Image (cartoon, coloured by chain):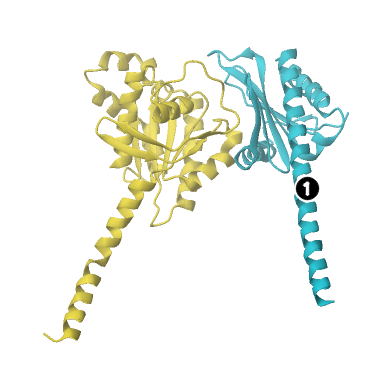
Amino acid sequence: MRAIASFWAQALDDVGADHFFHLGECVAEDSVSVRQSIVSRVAETLKKGRRYYCKDNVLLAADRSSFVTEVPMIERDPRGRVSPIVCYGSFDSIKEDGFADCLCEEIETFAVSIGQSVAPETLDLVREAFNILKKKQLRRKAAQLSAILLVTIVLLAIGYWVVMKKL
Amino acid sequence: MPFPVVAFWITVGFLHFLPFIILSVEKINRKVKGKKFAVLGARQVGKTHLIEFLLNGTIPRVYKKTMTPVKTTRERILLRELNLLVKESWDVSGDTSARAVWKDLVAEADFVLYLLRADQVLAGNTDVEARVKSDVRHVSEWIEQYQTTDKPKRLLLVGTHCDYNPEYKSKYNSDMAEFVDTFVKLPTINELVLRGGGLKKVKVIAGSMRTIQETEVLVYQMLREVLA
């Protein structure tokens, strides 16, 4: 299966280094640039983009080129804090069929690889979040197409009027 | 007196007071526009706690780890006689992988608040000391890189979790100044101050954020340094 997202999570003991997965591979602790680039892209998406979904600590934000989703794990840190997994990916991949299911599978795989787990109902929220995003995107595209169509009709009408006037 | 002579003297007088007028306008602007903070530090030093108190006057009861940056709002802080408008900023992760994000925050900030576990430094935890030294080295470089003469940036080292230190408990309410002084004089803190450009550029405060009252005392110290 092709990896569709990069993943980032903190060590539950709050002492160890953060965990990173990029293109289906674990990112080593000394790969500082890859780690920093994932965190920077996540920050950039959140700063420039829009929050589309926020429910029970599941968050989904996206800009034109990428998406970020935060998914809480079952396990808590020693201070009882909710510990999330952060997923980052390209916006284009969202359009593919079965994207949300693939992403949920990847989230589960990543969680298991770092000794943690995600509740099935949390993954349902992730699917719901992406469905909402898809619907909003479709509505936005429909609105854009309508606007383009309207402008074209107006321009054609003006052109027709000018030509008719000359005749 | 002929008209050109009057006009000449009015112009001379205006030019004489112009720098003072510009300075006053700048001062007013700064007060109206507010200050931007960059709250930085390793994990579990109290960044989210401090931001929450600064903006809402409360402390978080249950919260989640800060991974993705969370936007903070623009708020006016009124604490005792102090009054400060804080511009919107971001609450960011404390992991070293977030350093590029920290750098962006420093570039935009007027004040960099670097939080560190004072109890761990007082206990001589070498891992914490190494991390703090590395962070402050980076932060100082970014401050140097981004500050301009008209927009100087200042670094404030904020020692937190002092309540975990037995001496703090015994000196709380009586001899806090002496406790803070001991902290400031620690070789590690001295080194951090030197890395940041000396005591003129770097200020150090310490305290606890265990309760709302203790957080208020620490934030009050912090704001006094900021407004000084």
**Residue at left 76%, top 56%?**
A151
Question: In x, y percent, where is residue B47?
Answer: 47, 28
Question: In the rendered image, is residue A24 in sight?
Answer: yes
> Residue type at mark 1?
Ser
**Residue at left 39%, top 35%?**
B157
**Residue at left 31%, top 14%?**
B169
Residue with the mark numbered 1: A146
User: Which chain is assigned yellow?
Assistant: B
Question: In the rendered image, is residue B185 in sight?
Answer: no
Q: Quadrant of residue B168?
A: top left
**Residue at left 63%, top 18%?**
A56
Q: Nearer the viewer, residue B173 or A90?
A: A90
Question: In x, y percent, where is residue B111?
Answer: 41, 42
Quadrant where the image shows the C terminus of chain A: bottom right
Q: Nearer the viewer, residue A145 or B148?
A: A145
Q: Colour of chain A?
A: cyan
Question: In x, y percent, where is residue A22?
Answer: 76, 33
Q: Quadrant of residue B204?
A: top left
Q: Secondary structure at mark 1?
A: helix
Q: Nearer the viewer, residue A143 or A89?
A: A143
Q: Residues within 10 Å of mark 1 (few under 14, many from 20)?
A: few
Quadrant where the image shows the N terminus of chain A: top right
Above or below residue B203? Residue B217 is above
Apparent side of residue B203 relative to residue B195 in the rendered image (left or right): left
Callout 1: residue from which chain?
Answer: A
Question: In x, y percent, where is residue B112?
Answer: 43, 40
Counting the numbered discs, the total is 1
